[in-house]
């Protein structure tokens, strides 16, 4: 659906193609629903992700970004600071800046989760 003159919009997720972002492997797909390049957002990156069994994102950390993962379906392993945690439906994970993390689908069905990131870039702002 086309955006309103003020930038607001309603979009069905079926309109947004799946993408495999850098450092995502084995069918770790995301739909970038709200981000600067798809919606002109300035403060929020909002995605739905679907990882096939054995799919994963490489271990990484963010300089200034905070992230929330909200698991909708399936189960997997969330690595936080070197420790693995089983995650499943209704689990919410908060990741502050500087915490190394990774997520993988260790289950038998697709792992589906929301990812909310703020700010939209991971560049440190000069003081």
Image (tube, rainbow, N blue to C red):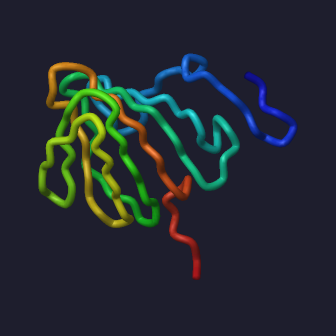
In the depicted structure, whether residue 75 falls above or below residue 118 = above
Q: At 31% from the left edge and 51% from the top edge, which residue is drawn?
A: 93
Q: Is residue 75 left or right of residue 22?
A: left
User: Which percent across, then down, holds residue 11?
Assistant: 65, 26
User: Which percent across, then down, holds residue 14?
Assistant: 55, 17
In the depicted structure, whether residue 119 falls above or below residue 10 = below
Quadrant position of residue 98:
bottom left
User: Which percent across, then down, holds residue 26?
Assistant: 26, 25
Q: Quadrant of the N terminus?
A: top right
Q: At 36% from the left edge and 45% from the top edge, which residue is drawn?
A: 69
Q: Nearer the viewer, residue 75 or 82?
A: 75
In the depicted structure, whether residue 98 falls above or below residue 94 = below
Q: Residue furthest top?
A: 14
Q: At 26% from the left edge and 58% from the top edge, which residue is drawn?
A: 100
Q: Is residue 4 left or right of residue 65?
A: right
Q: Quadrant of the C terminus?
A: bottom right
Q: Residue furthest front?
A: 90
């Amino acid at each position: 659906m086309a955006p309103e003159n003020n930038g607001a919009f309603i979009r069905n997720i079926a309109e947004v193609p799946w993408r495999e972002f850098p450092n995502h492997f084995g069918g770790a797909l995301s739909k970038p629903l709200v981000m600067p390049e798809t919606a002109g957002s300035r403060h929020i990156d909002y995605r739905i992700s679907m990882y096939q069994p054995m799919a994963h994102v490489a271990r990484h950390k963010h300089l200034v970004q905070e992230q929330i993962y909200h698991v909708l379906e399936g189960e997997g392993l969330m690595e936080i600071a070197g420790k693995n945690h089983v995650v499943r439906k209704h689990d919410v994970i908060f990741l502050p800046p500087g915490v190394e993390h990774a997520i993988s689908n260790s289950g038998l069905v697709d792992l589906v989760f929301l990812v909310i990131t703020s700010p939209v870039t991971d560049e440190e702002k000069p003081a």
